[in-house]
Structure formats: structure tokens, C-alpha cells
Image: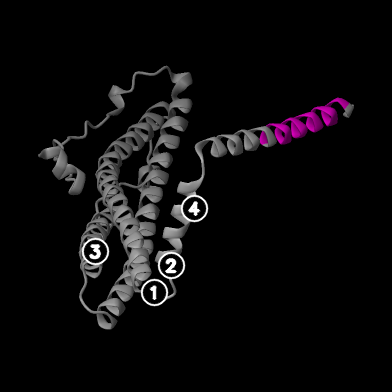
Amino acid sequence: MEKIREFFWPLLEKAEEQNVKLLTKEDIDVKENNLQKVLEYSMKIYESELGRNAAIEAKASLFMSSLAIITSVVLAITTTLIGQNNFSSILFLLICLLFFLTIYVLRTVWFAVKVHERKSFNTFYHSDILKNGEEKEYTKELISAIVNKTRKNALVINSKINNMVMAQEYFKRAIITLSIYSFSLIIFFITKCNFGIMSSVFKIVKAFDTVNIGTWLILLLILIAISSVIINCILLRRLSVTKNQP
């Protein structure tokens, strides 16, 4: 039952609350000639975390904008069909699909909005660098400040990633529902049209049924042979061009 529920309605697992272990300058046990490298790499990790946060928020905004357009178009189409057609089983199916699509879209937007929720984010300010002290102690203080801010930010970014994963899961289900909706919509219009599409489809199917399997096999072999000749000609031409190059 849990797998079935997860297939239709995935839930975000509750993670254990994590505490950030702050780094002090006494914990930095690095040779003095490597302190500048540690400072440089710590700053790069800090900046990469900032870039990761920006990428997650941009992706969430993309979900929100694309789903808003899709939902408005589908809703307009369904409303028009309901107003101009009598009740039918296919129309009822379209309404049900619209209901599930709306639920999935709302869940996607909900988790995408949670990505953009205002949370405490630690940035590097002037107060972190305008300090007195000897070069070695000053460098260690900078390293510890950067590492601590990075660790705190990682918790916030990881929570955003969890919400982003849930938004992706519901976005996938919305796309699948939209595909089923589009296919059902085509069937609805085929059943409503009056210029003989259904009879034409049946004629095409009957024509394929009259074709012998041997004929299909011959056509397939001919197609493979022609494809092989074309590929060989292309390869030979490229080979000759390569040989003629100095």
C-alpha cells in the first residue's frame, strides 16, 4: 500500500534535526604555509554553496511559471468543452484528469514556493574581515568564519533541495497526467468529428492486416540494405577527406 500511495502521492520524509558543529580557530590544525590555501578553498566552497542556492531557486521559479501557463490553457479548453457539449464518458474522463492535474500542479507550486521561503542565510560581511590580529590568527579566524557560515547555509540549502525534489516528483506526475489528458482530448475530437476519420483509421488498419508477413520482411531487408549503403558511403567519403588532409 505504501508503494501505491508513493506512486500517486509522494510524501516528504521527516529528517532528523541536525545541529551545526561550529569550527573554532583552535580546531584548525594546519601548517602555517598552507593557511592561505585553506582560506582560498574555504571561500570557493562558500561561493559554490551560494551558487547552488541560486540554481535551486531559479529551477523552482521555472516550475511555477511553466505550470501556470499549462494549467490556464487546460482549464480554458475543458471549460469550453463542458459549455458546448453534452455529458459523455470521455468528457467525464477529461474532467477527472483536469482535477488530478490541478492537484499535482498545486502540490508542485506549493513545494516550489517553500523553496523561496525566507530563511536565515549567512553571508560574508565587512564585519567578518575588519578585525585586528596577527596574520596567522587573523587567517584562522577568517577560515573558521567562512566554514561556519558554509555549514549553516548547507542546512538551509538541503531543506530547499528536499522541497525541490518533491516539486520535481509532483511535476513528473503532472506531466504524465497532462499526456493522458492530451490523448483523451484527441479521442474526444475524433468521436465528435463528422468527416469520417474513424472509418479512415479502420480502413488503414485493414490494409495493414492484408499485407503478408513475408512482404514486411522483404521491405525491412530492403530498408536495412539501403541504410547500410548510405552509411558506408558517408564513412568512405569522410575517410577519403581525412587521408587528403595534410
- The picture places residue 120, in percent across and down from the top left corner, at 25, 51
Q: Which amino acid, by three-letter code, is at mark 2? A: Ile
* Residue under numbered circle 2: 197
Foreground disc of the pair 2, 4: 4
Q: Identify the image quadrant of residue 22.
A: top left
* Residue under numbered circle 3: 102
Q: CA distance from mark 3 to mark 2?
A: 31 Å
Q: Residue furthest left?
A: 1
Please rate how many residues cluster around mark 2, counting C-alpha atoms within 10 Å: few if below 14, some from 14 to 19, many from 20: few
Checking the image for residue 193, the label placed there is 1
* Camera-nearest residue between 82 and 30: 82
Based on the picture, tell me whether residue 230 belongs to the magenta stretch: yes
Report the span colored magenta.
227-243
Say which element carries label 3: helix
**x 23%, y 58%: residue:** 110
* Residue under numbered circle 4: 207
Rendered position, 28 above or below 43: above
- The picture places residue 118, in percent across and down from the top left corner, at 25, 57
Q: CA distance from mark 3 to mark 4?
A: 42 Å
Foreground disc of the pair 4, 1: 4
Say which element carries label 1: loop
Foreground disc of the pair 3, 2: 2
Tag 1 near tag 2, CB within 8 Å = yes
Q: CA distance from mark 1 to mark 2?
A: 7 Å
Please rate how many residues cluster around mark 4, counting C-alpha atoms within 10 Å: few if below 14, some from 14 to 19, many from 20: few
Image position of 228 (left or right of 97): right
Q: CA distance from mark 2 to mark 4?
A: 15 Å
Image position of 99 (left or right of 175): left
Rendered position, 113 above or below 79: above
Image position of 36 (left or right of 146): right
Q: CA distance from mark 1 to mark 3?
A: 28 Å
